[in-house]
Each structure stands twice: as structure tokens, then as C-alpha cells.
Amino acid sequence: MTRDGFLPPLPLRTRMQVTKLLQFSPSKSALYRLVRPIMANTEAFREPDLCELLHLFADSLSSPSLFIDRVVRLFLAYQPPDYHLSPRTRKHIALLHVRVGNKRHSYRWTPDPRLPQLQPQVDSIRAVSSAQSLSDLVTSPLTSYAPSPYATLLDELALKDPSMAEYPAAVSKMQKEMPSLVPNLEFLNALLANEVVRRKYRAVFAIYRGMMSTRSLSDMPDATTFSVVFRAIARVQASAAHRRRGRHALQSADIPHPRSVYRDMLTCHAEYLQMRPTALTHTFDRAVLHRALAALLAMQDYPGAFMAIRAFNYFKSSLDRPTLATYKIVIKALRERILRELPQLALYVEPDGFWAYRFLGLEYLPRHLRGSLRTDLEMVHRLLVFGSESRTNLEFVDAPSYPFGEGSKVDVEVFKQLGMPTPLEVWGVRTLGGPERRCAVLPLERILRRATLASFKTMYSTRGQTSEALKEAKMDMIPYRVYSQPIS
């Protein structure tokens, strides 16, 4: 009957059913349920029929890019394991993405012989039959069928910068030994970590920028990516050699500011949760926040560090509360700067140009006592006391002495009442709950507010200046889509 023209062929019947359903503005899940059993008939539904169907979706749906990719994955799921899409079909899919205004997705389907072909890597029929809706398909192993948007990233970077030509060459050599190797997110994360060890920071930052510009909802930088980038920034800032190497030194334009990287991280976090509201984020956690905090403190960006600490108030499900490790990062960075600046104070008649002089309130301490200021447990105690003061000021705070490094007679009840670790815990002499012991957020905010106030090169800075600096940091670091609440 089909041969005689009485019964339309399956592809034509499919387009007719889809066209009729589209008149009622159906959900993408309803369309998916309609086409799924049709694609199971692999003898009657072929690649040209797939292209016609995708063309119909591109013309009729709003934001069809993701749905087009899902339909292609569904088609591939019913094909044999060694099946490959033809270059013509891949080009057709790429042109459809360009047509609907999503050029980034089109790069993933360009029929470039260097790109790996799509190959199902699981029992495709079983996986598809168990997916009851489009959302099930999105979170199923079928998402691994799409080519990674990072597949050609290294080639593009090599074209722009010949010094990076070693990366595509290395990938080609590895693919000869491992044909299944694809430069995906995990591969690039490993490459970034390796280049940080080799101190090739310019390459790290270039690859990171490429990963951000080519990201998609299914492939975007994760917590490992941002952790490596923050570590690279902290190492660059901590190394004075990079500032003395002349033409070999990294220019400021090559180094992304940790504020911008933090903003990128929250942007990816928001995009990931927008796609999977009930999923656990893979972009933002306490470990990567600690890396961000260390990078900001290495740049002496105390307003930025304040905003990073404030994230504990807004992302409680991802971060929970600060730990002893969080306190150690902040106290260590502040104490190290004090250690660098204190010996220089005696060389100046008016040392108020030094941050440590203002931060510790040494204006209120007699000159002959400034040189005897201890920087061990006594200094750690003093820094923690700053976190117990409700009013931000730059007054000098006395600290008790710790005999024999034990401090058994020092009263630390105020720290415990405020949810803070004791000086001995921060110093590492005595640990009650381990490095993962939960602590309070507010004392860290107070310490960093004081550090921000001391950053203004005058002893008469106002708290209004501090608020303005914090608001500026918020604008730089927090995408509006994440949250918009005033700084108290």
C-alpha cells in the first residue's frame, strides 16, 4: 500500500503529525514523546528524514538549539555502535544552529575531519527506552554523545598564538595511541593543572579564556577549572620574579583579575542550576572558594575577599559554613603582610603610609613599643580579636602573651561564643574539631572590613569609604542574575 501511494511513508507521516501538534504550542517533552517511537524504526527513518524533521523544529520552536541536539542524540541512540553521521548531515545541523542564532553550538557540528565522530558508548536502546521525558534524556548518559565544544579549542589557540602549536601536536600524537581521546573538559582541566606546574601561566589563562568563550550549557568550566586558574593567579602574584623579568614577564593584560574569574564562576554556577535546578552544582564548592579567597588575598584585594566570604551567606547549600581552614587562609595572608611591613616602619618618621601601621592601629602605640610587637601567637590573637569587634575601627588592640607557645592561661571564651576558632587552633597547636570544623561567617567579615578600611592611605578614612569599596567589589564580582541584595 505504501508503494502504491495509499499510505504515506513514515517520515512524511511524522512531519504531518509534528506539524499538527505544533499548532497547539506543545512542550518540547510532548514533541520528544512523539518522535521517540518513530526513530526506533531505523529501517524507515534515515538521516535525510532526520534533517527534514530538525528543519521543522528550527522553524517552529523558540530556543530550539538544545532540543535539536537532543533529537540528534535520540536518533544516534537507535543506531549501531559504529554508526557515524555523514559530513553532509553534520553540516546541515551546524547551519540550523547558525540559522536560529546559536553560532556557538554550530561549531560542535562542523564536519571537520579532525573532529571525533559521534559514537554511542552505552546500550543506546536500553538508555533511550528508560528515558520518560526530555529532562530524563538531558541527564542520561546520552549527553556524552555530543562532540565537546572544546574539541577544536587548542587548534584555534594555536592559530592565534604560534607558541601554543605544541598542544594540537601533542593531542594528535596521543590520539594515534588512543583513538578515543577527545579534548573534553576533563582533558583540558588536566592540561591546565600540568601547565601550572610547568609555570606556563600565559597558556593557562589563554586556554581558560577559550573555555569560557566556547562553553555551552552541557559543557562549561567546573570547580576544578576555576580552582586551577585561581591557583595560577595566586602563584603569579606571590612570585616577585614575574615582576622583574622584563620582556618575559606576564603583562597585566595576560592575567585575569580574580574578581573577573570569580564572576565567571558564579555565572557558570547560575547557568548550570538554570538547566538542572534540582542537581548538585559541579561549579561552586568550598574548596574552589578557598582558592578564590587565596588569590584575592594574594592581590591584597580585601573588598573582593570580603565578597568571597559573604558567599557563605548566599550559597549555604553549596558551601555550608566557613571552616577552620577558611580562617587559616585569611589570618595567614594578613599576618604575612604584617611580617613584611613591620620591619620597615622604623625607617620612616611618618610610617602611616604602610597598611600594617594603619591596620594594627600603631598610631595609638608609643613609638618605643612598636619594635617589640610580637608576630607569633600574640599577633594571631590580635587578628582574631578584630573579628569580635562589632564596630569597624583602626584602634590598637592589646593581646595577651602566650608563654611557652601554649597559652593555657589565656582566656579564649569570647572566641568560642562567637563561633570562632581559638588562636591555638589557627596556629595549629591544638585542634578540637579538625580542619573541617564549622565556624561563623561574621568575624571574618569584620576582619576583612577592617583590612579594607586600612587600605585607604590615611588614618582618617571613614566607614563610608569602606562601604563604597565593598559595593564596587560586589558589582565586579556578582552577576545580577545570582542575587541582588544591599550590603549591610
Image: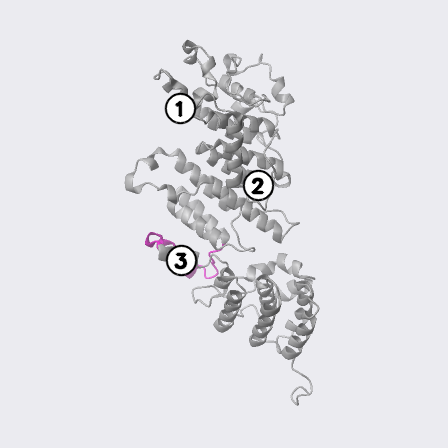
| Residue drawn at point x = 51 percent, y = 54 percent | 215
Q: From the image, give the main secondary structure of the stretch colored magenta.
A: helix
- Residue type at tag 2: Asp
First of labels 2, 3 by sequence position: 3
Q: Which mark is residue 156?
A: 3
79 or 139: nearer the viewer: 139
CB-based contact (under 8 Å), mark 2 and mark 3: no
Quadrant of the rendering where the C terminus is positioned: top right
Disc 1: CA contacts within 10 A as few (<14), some (14-19) or many (>=20): few
Tell me residue 65's x, y (percent): 57, 63
Q: Quadrant of residue 11?
A: bottom right
Task: Find the distance from the CA under tag 1 to the CA under tag 2.
Answer: 32 Å
Q: Residue at x 61, y 49 (%)?
A: 273
The residue at the far bottom in this view is: 4
Badge 1 is on which residue? 340
Horizontal side, residue 145 vs residue 191: left or right:
right
Up-down relation of residue 215 to residue 51 (above or below): above
- Of tags 1 and 2, the one toward the viewer is 1
Q: Please state the extent of the stretch shown in magenta in the rendering.
A: 161-184
- Rendered view: 197 above or below 102: above
Disc 3 versus disc 1: distance between alpha carbons?
Answer: 43 Å
Q: Amino acid at mark 1?
A: Arg
